[in-house]
Image: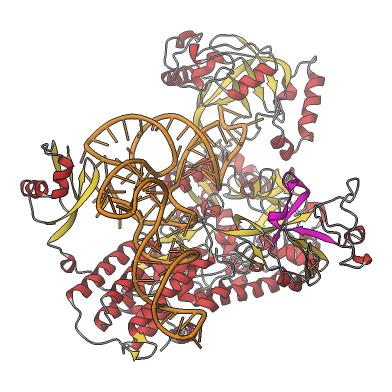
Amino acid sequence: MEYRFNEIEKKWQDKWKANKAYKVSNDSAKPKYYVLDMFPYPSGAGLHVGHPLGYIASDIYSRYKRLKGFNVLHPMGFDSFGLPAEQYAIETGQHPAETTKNNIATFKAQLDKIGFCYDWDREVRTSDPQYYKWTQWIFLEIFNSYFDKKEKKAKPITELVKQFETEGNPFTTHYSSFTSEEWKAFDHKKKQEILMEYRLAFSKYGEVNWCEVLGTVLANDEVVNGVSERGGYPVVKKKMRQWYLRITDYADRLLEGLEKVDFSDSMKEMQRNWIGKSQGAEIDFAIKGTDQSLKVYTTRPDTIFGVDFMVVAPELNLVQEIKSTEQAAAVDEYIAYVKSRSDVDRMAEKKITGCFTGAYAINPFSQQEIPIYISEYVLAGYGTGAIMAVPCGDDRDFKFAHHFNIPITNIIGAYFNGTEANATKEAILENSGFLNGMKMMDASEVVLQKLEEQGIGKRKVNYRMRDAGFSRQRYWGEPFPIIWTDGVAIPLDAAELPLELPHVDKYGPGPEGEGPLANISDWVNTPAGRRETSTMPGYAGSSWYFLRYMDPQNNETFCDRKASNYWNQVDLYIGGTEHAVGHLLYSRLWTKVLFDLGKIGFDEPFRRLVNQGMITGVSEFIYRYADDGNSDSKFMGTQIPYFDIDISDLLSESITPAAMMAKGEGQFYFSYDSIPMGEENRFDPRRVYITYVDANKLDVERLVKDDSKYFKAFFVTKEGFYFRGKWYTKEKDLSGKQIFMTSSAGEKMSKSKLNAINPDDLVIKYGADTFRMYEMFLGPVEASKPWDTKGIEGVHRFLRKLWRLFFDDIKGKIWTDEKATDAELKILHRTIKKIEEDTERFSFNTAVSAFMICVNDLFDVKCHKKEVLEKILILLVPYAPHIAEELWHQLDNAGTILDAAYPTFDAALLVESSKEYPVSINGKVRANINLALNLEQAEVEKMILQNEVVQKWLEGKDPKKIIYVKNKMVNVVV
RNA sequence: GCCCAUGUGGCGGAAUUGGUAGACGCAGCAGACUCAAAAUCUGCCAUUCGCAAGGGUGUGAAGGUUCGAUUCCUUUCGUGGGCACCA
């Protein structure tokens, strides 16, 4: 009986589906365990082998936990709102709802073939109105909340209104203070304007990242190096009314929360960097000749005597007030220059620019006059938008001082060499008035106290993180449940949700940068006012999806409190690092808000996060001869470029290279090994679909047959060339077939790079079980590694070998009911121990290897006993569920193996009485000696010294010392 | 520039707490079975000296701690990722 994996896998997948084997109940006596994958965006490209890596890991762990007696929630869904579907709609006219539906169907079919244990009844799709109803609902909850700075938590905005009515404004942080009487006297619009300053989801005019090509604004983390993350289009700053989430209020809680979760250090570090907390001081410098002052932010108050100039962001209004008449023209000119520069320009060339304002600040301690400059290197949006420049300690300040010939005060003595700034905190201060002789680290505190005493400065914590932009001028996203009336945002009533996306025929932008929804006038204009035409960004739906899985069909609430109390936090979350500062931060924020408002009982969504590494692909390149056809035309005759063949008598005149190139038709592709040295830059590397390449050998015939764009191409090898179905050699022989070489390079796997490997093909060829195990066998889940399809044979051989423990091709059934020997039990229990340990610590690659060792060992002892084999099968369920279930039934077992009792490891079976000790002389292993494990030092020494090899190395001398580590080794020091 | 990872055979990787470096697999080589192929099985497989026995070297590099270092420390180089005029 053969291992017919295709039949077996189909059979069990159907049975499991029919029996609802993966149905998960919210009501169970078992302990719960929640395993979550980052749900995919269903792109049109389908899955490649890189995607399922994390899904397989989580599936293994889920199935393992289930065997161990847990009620395991392991759901899957789709993050189905987003830009690509809309871009595709613009290009093809297909409605995003349609393409999304089709793409999801493809994804589900691909996933199901790999045999995941998802409860599809819990599937969520963020673009489903029954889902985004609750996204909108949560948005309204956030909109109707404010952050109480004293209690550091979100509260309903109604409580703030109550406070305003009774006490007036208790804070001055967001808005100027007022009394309760004043509040009551404000009209509705004024009140709403004030409340908008406090809402956790709020709207304001702000500078946003505007991407003209995409026709939308982008969040900070969606902009990379001044261009859009998706598509790489230029991004400029633009003032627009936008929605934001007040994530900055949660900066501290988001930082503190990191202490409570099990994320990798690098992941935590990325989030900390993004939040960018810094401790420092705000200091007021009087401005000479005015009653104004200049407020700067610094993290180094200890350097205050080293301040040689001030720099203010050009955008600040203060600049206009303080500029001197002589400098006014220069200042305005500079500001105009700064405005003309985009972010991309700024990043591309970081040159030192700036302009003196003509104004001076006064150092409060030394009374020295300090010139005030403006420069684009100071950002308006961070701190106070102004800095005190200390050129001896800050690199940028030093370069600026150097460029403008500003004299530098050295306060750090020998630490400053005059040619480079030194940001040390160790130096003993000089030229620093009352700080002289003090260590910099200690001086900060002294300065801070003095500043506070004199009322000219205070301690201040700053964050690099900005409030998160929450609106997009797009169609394919959640509509905001907001109607604008007389400039006031009126939320829809919860009963009116979901506010469904209206159908549109065109996806072009609306007037004045608005989204496509602005074009549908009968949707936009309602009796109550004008609807908000932006939609929510991609991260809205994904910020809370893990809650919906707990209670996916509930029409009464986003997630029943009983369900969220039962399932609680996600115990294990698996996904890529690319969401470090986007999705993960936003879902942590939403969870905290929902917790503060009492909607759920925990304030961190993910207890443990594992980042799967990226599987890189291997791209194959062929080289196109890139002649511009102009001056250097020595190759334009009847010869192939760089090649000594006159082909005029091989091919007819009408298809000579010259004729073809003149018509812009013929292309020359060169085999990698035939590219002339030193001429590489005349060749244009082109990716070629990897299925045409085997070990750098290109199957030219198939490529040309399949892809018409190569039909008129010449493929030049060292010996000759291929053209229109025939090989030609230098000797004008038409028979010889030649080798066309590609070159290869590893890079990210993707369909567009033509290096994607489709899991479907592998599942058909080797089966899902082989595929799952091989993905794990590649290496540690968290490491990035290259894909190499060849290795899959090894894993497949292992499964076939396992099968042959049960069945022989000729004899058929060979498993028996005989009692297992001690040696066999030893193999079994060693494996139980190893698999359990490895699975627990996510070391799936070594677990696969342990299975191989086990099967090899069982083969060596010819063990075909059910007693041993059925236990192995249970261990194998998480990794290769189909073959495990099939063989389980072949062993005449009843019921499904998915819920079998996990074997327990019996340590007694592995106890040894003696061990082969490696004996080393001076740390180098020279011999192996079998010793009883219960020996003491003295006995061991005696036995070691009798050993021939040891005696030889001792050369008659006495050993200095003998180190004996029980159960490890013996080391003789000579 | 700053921060975080990481570096082991031809390749993917193993060595969990400082204790026999290279498990397991791929590729390769030699052989068995076969008319042949596939499948399967056996052996070899870091490097170097040696017929062999046996020895030298070896975990990016250089030092250090230790009886003993892939593992800990210092310096340095390479690769990958994150942040980046954030004062």
Q: Work out whether residue A146 or residue A464 is closer to the camera in this orientation and state it.
A: A464
**Is residue A696 inside the magenta stretch?**
no
| A943 horizontally vs A901: left or right | left
Asked if residue A293 is positioned above or below residue B66 in the image, the reply reads above
Looking at the rendered image, the quarter that the N terminus of chain A falls into is bottom left
Asked if residue A150 is positioned above or below residue A695 in the image, the reply reads above
Locate residue B84, reporting x and y percent.
61, 37
The image quadrant that residue A883 belongs to is bottom left
Total marks shown come to 0
Q: Work out whether residue A921 or residue A247 is closer to the camera in this orientation and state it.
A: A921
Residue A472 makes an appearance in the image:
no
Asked if residue A742 is positioned above or below residue A904 in the image, the reply reads above
**Is residue A669 inside the magenta stretch?**
yes
Q: Which residues are magenta?
A: A665-688
Locate residue A159, reporting x and y percent.
51, 50
Q: Work out whether residue A820 or residue A705 is closer to the camera in this orientation and state it.
A: A705
Asked if residue B14 is positioned above or below residue A705 in the image, the reply reads above
| A486 horizontally vs A665: left or right | left
Locate residue A732, reporting x and y percent.
81, 66
Q: Residue at x 12, y 50 (%)?
A: A947
Looking at the rendered image, the quarter that the C terminus of chain A falls into is top left
Q: Work out whether residue A602 or residue A584 is closer to the camera in this orientation and state it.
A: A584
| A740 horizontally vs A330: left or right | left
The image quadrant that residue A819 belongs to is bottom left
Residue A584 makes an appearance in the image:
yes
How is the protein colored in the picture? secondary structure
